[in-house]
Amino acid sequence: MGLQVVMGAMTQCSFGAAPSSLMVLPTNRVMCGGVPAATIMDFAPMMNILPFAMCNSPANPMVIAATAAAMGVLTPMPCIPVTTPWTPGVPQVLIGGMPALNDGCKCMCAWGGSISVSMAGQFQTQD
């Protein structure tokens, strides 16, 4: 059993330089600990998943260009996430018809990063 993820949860990308907060809009009108509860569909870049400072992924086109300009020295560039829905979710708990998001779920970035939840945002409700 994992903890239900809510707005303000801390997330981390394997290629990111710093953690980031998960933003969950109150569209489903389901609260957990007084803040909106997240689902697997809360993955929209720059709306739900905010940048992780600098990106170190060698698959990111901006990092590739900056590294080439620096004569092959890996050069991090600002993070702009390109994400897919969270997996696997909690299919036994539906929020707005979608599986709930718990702290064991992962989200993938198109540049190769794996985004995980490092702190669920609340410590009382388990899925």
Image: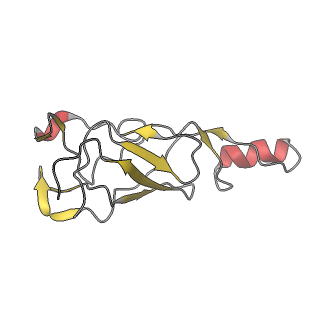
Quadrant in which the N terminus is drawn = bottom left
- Give me the residue at 23% from left, 51% from top: 39
Q: Which corner quadrant of the image does residue 45 belong to?
A: top left
Q: Which is nearer the eye, 42 or 2?
A: 2
Residue placed at 27% from the left, 51% from the top? 41
Q: Which of 16 and 45 is in front in this view?
A: 16
Give x and y (percent) for residue 47. 36, 35
Q: Position of residue 30 (x, y in %)?
A: 11, 41
Q: Position of residue 101 (x, y in %)?
A: 25, 54
Q: Which colour scheme is used?
A: secondary structure
Question: Looking at the image, which residue is at 68% across and 43% down?
Answer: 62
Residue sitting at the far front: 123
Q: In this view, does 54 lie to the left or right of 38?
A: right
Q: In which quarter of the image is the C terminus?
A: bottom left
From the top left corner, tell me how far across and down residue 23 is, in percent. Answer: 32, 36
Asked if residue 27 lies left or right of residue 46, the reply is left
The one of 34 and 91 positioned closer to us in this rendering: 34
Q: Compared to 22, does 84 lie above or below? A: below
What residue lies at 85% left-to-right and 42% top-to-bottom? Answer: 70
